[in-house]
Image (spheres, rainbow, N blue to C red):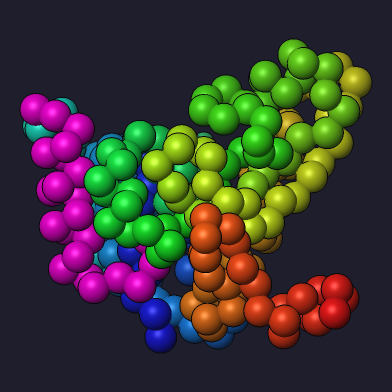
Amino acid sequence: AKSIVVLVSGNGSNLQAILEQISLGKINGKVTAVVSNKQSAYALTRAKEAGIPAIFIDHKSFASRESYDQALKKSIDEFTPDLIVLAGFMRILTPEFVDYYSARMLNIHPSLLPKYKGLDTHQRAIDAGDVEHGASVHFVTPELDGGPVVLQSKVPIFERQDPDELAQRVQQQERQMYPLVISWFCSDRLKMQNNKAMLDDKILAEMGYA
Ligand code: GAR
């Protein structure tokens, strides 16, 4: 099974969904550590409850982004990861860090990329008058939220849409799609090549494309 290190900053509902699919045998992997830059992240509690090392590395105790990322890397590499999963990790990573984990780091972003990179995506989609919104799973490259997209899931934006309700529907989709993409990676059916996502023919057939 592949070693997966999950980076978090918050609630950890995506982490929970991944752990559930692993325990159901749907992912050929094991979460070997969960690392947070926020001590209060509920995701750390979820990790502890699952018996997984839950590590807090405080960005406030480092002078620079580079030194923080070096500490993060050192901590992560103790678990010899095959895959780094960003699951609500709310910190920009240095290009050095991203390049070091090139082609083995995934992120989930709450928008239909390339729309709405960055923060406050749900409100921005509503304000723009969009009729649909969603989430994207992508490989991480140095361009913020700009790496190759693997899978997207759409939800409608309703009349007089409340942003929190929209976020909930998007997150429900996230909990379906992120474990699926991770399962592909862990069974060597998904790669990044030439800055593009590449799926093997077997998955394409399963999805009805081949
Ligand atoms: C998710 O909606 C995820 O897409 C978003 O944070 C939430 C984390 O939820 N990520 C970003 O905005 C990344 N910039 P969770 O902690 O319950 O998994």
Q: Quadrant of residue 26?
A: bottom right
Q: Residue furthest front?
A: 194
Total marks placed? 0
**Image quadrant where one finds the C terminus:** bottom right
Residue 180 lies left or right of residue 206; in this view the side is: left
Q: Is residue 34 or residue 110 the one in the foreground?
A: 110
Residue 76 lies in the magenta-colored region: yes
Residue depicted at x 40% and y 35%: 90
Q: Nearer the viewer, residue 123 or 46?
A: 123
Highlighted range, magenta: 63-84
Q: Residue at x 57, y 30 (%)?
A: 117
- Residue 204 on image: x %, y %: 77, 76
- In the image, residue 190 lies at what x, y percent? 57, 72
Residue 101 x %, y %: 33, 59
Q: Position of residue 70 (x, y in %)?
A: 14, 47
Check the image and report above or below for 132 versus 87: above
Which residue is found at the position 20% from the left and 43% from the top?
69
Residue 158 in the image: above or below residue 7: above
Residue 34 visible in the snapshot: no
Was residue 138 drawn as part of the magenta stretch in this picture?
no
Kindly tell me whether residue 7 is visible in this rendering: yes
Q: Is residue 209 above or below residue 53?
A: below
In the rendered view, does 73 fall on the left or right side of 195? left
Horizontal relation, residue 59 to residue 7: left or right = left
Q: In which quadrant is the N terminus drawn? A: bottom left
In this rendering, would 133 be left or right of 138? right
Q: Does 21 appear above or below 86?
A: below
Q: Residue at 58% x, 58% y: name it.
A: 196
Q: Residue furthest right?
A: 159
